[in-house]
């Protein structure tokens, strides 16, 4: 260190340090600004949902339905495939691990809890972030660059009401719905594997699953999915609307959206579990 | 000719604008009269598009004020803003058509979002406006299938669908060949004649400006040099205006070849 300081000169090291601190400060301020924008977008969305019609800025049902199709219905095939894979993987892993203790039949408990509380919301959140979050960010970024958002503002159509609220409402409905679907498919796939591997009948497997799970377990998974839905839409809109540059900027913002969404999903999940297991 | 009155529909007062720390407009004041075609002219980076964005309420001034139809854009409420914007239309340089919608859907969008009309009425209005801008029968095309001039016409059709009191056009003839550019100028004159609206046009095309303008504002480096009728601007004694009209560099001592040589390190032929 002392050699480096001597070689570069103390002024140079001081300047580097100052530049590093400046970059850090700028990043922190930028992050706080984005957080503030996300909060403002959420408040605006609630405003338009509640008072939009009275202010002649109604949120169109047709736009919400179109977004629901894009976020939910179009994601069903891939959601089914991934959920079945997760269910099979958990059953395989569970049976293999529990075999050590000769307790393979207990795999039902592991699959029931982990799928309902963790894997279904997680896999759905990550899937929606990758499909719809990136698509929403790219759409808003392209519209911003092409001045389409400005055109909306000038013609008196609030961009939050027109672009954000339909996506937010659709995500709030479809992400929990997909999570529920994902949990069912994963349990079913695991049940089918357990039936063939351990000879436990599927109907018995299903009955045991229902006995093990409480409503609170389901609410735990669905509660998370609601938070994931809001996070995905807000992160996508914040990233899309703050685009700079042309096509390259759109690409950067889209990638950033997916990375931020997945990070937010995992961190929120951990915090949710921490809070939920305190009580 | 024009049906303008001397009543101002837009009043810009001591407008100062910055992008980040960089000053763009330095205390610009002007008024746009009801029913006139008002052209804002200037070279690249003169601040004309920034001035237009402030007139449309898309930017918040650092200082000064912009009043449109009697309302101060900086102090009005959200409801007043929604109401005022229904009386404004804009045709951006790029057209800014929504790429996922057909031309017809683009034009009907303001009606769908802001007016309580049935589908048939909206379609009739859309076809009328398309005819007015010379695009009858193009409603089912996607924006990507239109040429540059057609996209600008479609953008104008969308901008006038609500019969606004003020139409803003940002560089309507930029990037078009002279024939298409001249046809767009004719369209602007025709729209004013047919719809009796005030039209604010930003352009750096001199021919276009002198052809359509009732009055021209000339900006240079964020400062307003003059606001006057086209003939007075053409014969203005102000040097930067004459430089702009005759496309002369502002500093005649700058030798472009020497400048290029300095940049590239190679002698220029």
Image (cartoon, coloured by chain):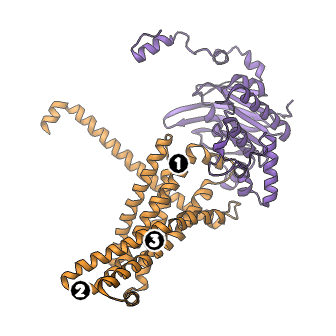
* Chain of residue at mark 2: A
Q: Find residue B157 and report its horizontal and vertical position in percent.
A: 75, 44
The chain whose colour is purple is B
Looking at the image, which residue sits at the far left? Answer: A3
Colour of the chain lettered A: orange
Q: Is residue B97 visible?
A: yes
Q: Is residue A275 visible?
A: no
Q: Which mark is residue A141?
A: 1
CA gap between label 2 and label 3 equals 29 Å
* Residue for point 60% across, 30% down: B47
Residue B73 higher or lower than A71, as above or below: above
Q: Kindly indicate whether the residue at mark 1 contacts the one at mark 3 (C-beta within 8 angstroms).
A: no
Q: Which mark is residue B154?
A: none
Q: Find residue B33 and report its horizontal and vertical position in percent.
A: 78, 35
* Residue for point 54% across, 36% down: B18
Which residue is denoted by mark 2 in the rendering? Answer: A103
Q: Earlier in the sequence, mark 3 or mark 1?
A: 3
Q: Earlier in the sequence, mark 2 or mark 3?
A: 3
Residue A78 vs residue B152: left or right? Answer: left
CA gap between label 1 and label 2 equals 53 Å
CA gap between label 3 and label 1 equals 30 Å
Residue B114 vs residue B195: left or right? Answer: left
Closer to us: A6 or A135: A135
Q: Residues within 10 Å of mark 1 (few under 14, many from 20)?
A: many
Residue A113 vs residue A226: left or right? Answer: left
Q: Secondary structure at mark 1?
A: helix
Which residue is denoted by mark 3 in the rendering? Answer: A80
Residue A58 vs residue A6: left or right? Answer: right
* Chain of residue at mark 1: A
Residue A155 higher or lower than B153, as above or below: below
């Amino acid at each position: 260190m002392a050699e480096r300081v001597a070689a570069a000169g103390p002024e140079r090291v001081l300047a580097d340090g100052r530049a590093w601190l400046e970059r850090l400060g700028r990043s922190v301020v930028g992050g706080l600004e984005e957080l503030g924008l996300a909060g403002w977008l959420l408040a605006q969305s609630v405003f338009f949902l509640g008072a939009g019609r009275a202010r002649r800025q109604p949120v169109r049902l047709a736009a919400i339905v179109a977004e629901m199709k894009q976020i939910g219905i179009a994601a069903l095939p891939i959601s089914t495939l991934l959920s079945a894979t997760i269910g099979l993987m958990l059953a395989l892993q569970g049976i293999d691990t529990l075999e050590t203790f000769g307790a393979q039949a207990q795999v039902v408990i592991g699959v029931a809890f982990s799928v309902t509380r963790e894997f279904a919301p997680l896999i759905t959140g990550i899937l929606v972030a990758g499909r719809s979050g990136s698509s929403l960010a790219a759409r808003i970024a392209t519209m911003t660059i092409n001045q389409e958002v400005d055109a909306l503002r000038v013609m008196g159509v609030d961009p939050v009401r027109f672009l954000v609220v339909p996506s937010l409402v659709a995500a709030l409905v479809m992400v929990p719905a997909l999570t529920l679907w994902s949990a069912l498919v994963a349990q079913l796939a695991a049940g089918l594997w357990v039936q063939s591997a351990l000879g436990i009948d599927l109907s018995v497997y299903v009955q045991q699953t229902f006995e093990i799970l409480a409503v609170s377990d389901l609410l735990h998974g669905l509660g998370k999915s609601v938070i994931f839905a809001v996070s995905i839409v807000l992160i996508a809109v914040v990233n899309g609307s703050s685009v700079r540059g042309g096509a390259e900027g759109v690409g950067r913002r889209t990638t950033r959206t997916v990375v931020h969404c997945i990070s937010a999903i995992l961190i929120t999940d951990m915090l949710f579990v921490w809070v939920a297991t305190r009580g | 000719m024009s049906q303008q009155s001397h009543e101002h529909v837009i009043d810009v007062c001591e407008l100062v604008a910055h992008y980040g720390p960089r000053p763009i407009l330095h205390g610009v004041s002007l008024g746009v009269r009801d029913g006139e075609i008002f052209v804002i002219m200037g070279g690249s980076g003169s601040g004309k598009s920034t001035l237009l964005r402030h007139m449309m309420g898309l930017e918040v001034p650092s200082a000064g004020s912009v009043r449109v139809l009697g309302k101060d854009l900086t102090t009005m409420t959200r409801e007043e803003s929604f109401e005022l914007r229904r009386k404004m239309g804009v045709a951006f340089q790029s057209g800014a058509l929504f790429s996922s919608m057909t031309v017809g859907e683009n034009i009907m969008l303001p009606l769908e979002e802001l007016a309580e009309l049935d589908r048939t009425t909206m379609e009739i209005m859309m076809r009328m406006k398309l005819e007015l801008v010379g695009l009858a029968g193009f409603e089912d095309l996607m924006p990507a299938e239109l040429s540059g001039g057609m996209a600008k016409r479609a953008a104008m059709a969308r901008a006038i669908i609500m019969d606004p009191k003020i139409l803003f056009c940002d560089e309507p003839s930029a990037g078009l060949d002279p024939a298409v550019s001249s046809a767009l100028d004719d369209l602007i004159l025709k729209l004013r004649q047919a719809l009796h609206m005030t039209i604010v046009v930003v352009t750096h095309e001199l021919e276009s400006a002198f052809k359509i303008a009732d009055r021209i504002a000339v900006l240079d480096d964020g400062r307003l040099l003059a606001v006057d009728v086209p003939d007075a601007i053409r014969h203005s004694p102000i040097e930067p205006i004459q430089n702009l009209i005759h496309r002369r560099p502002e500093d005649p001592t700058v030798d472009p070849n020497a400048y290029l040589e300095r940049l590239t390190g190679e002698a220029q032929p």
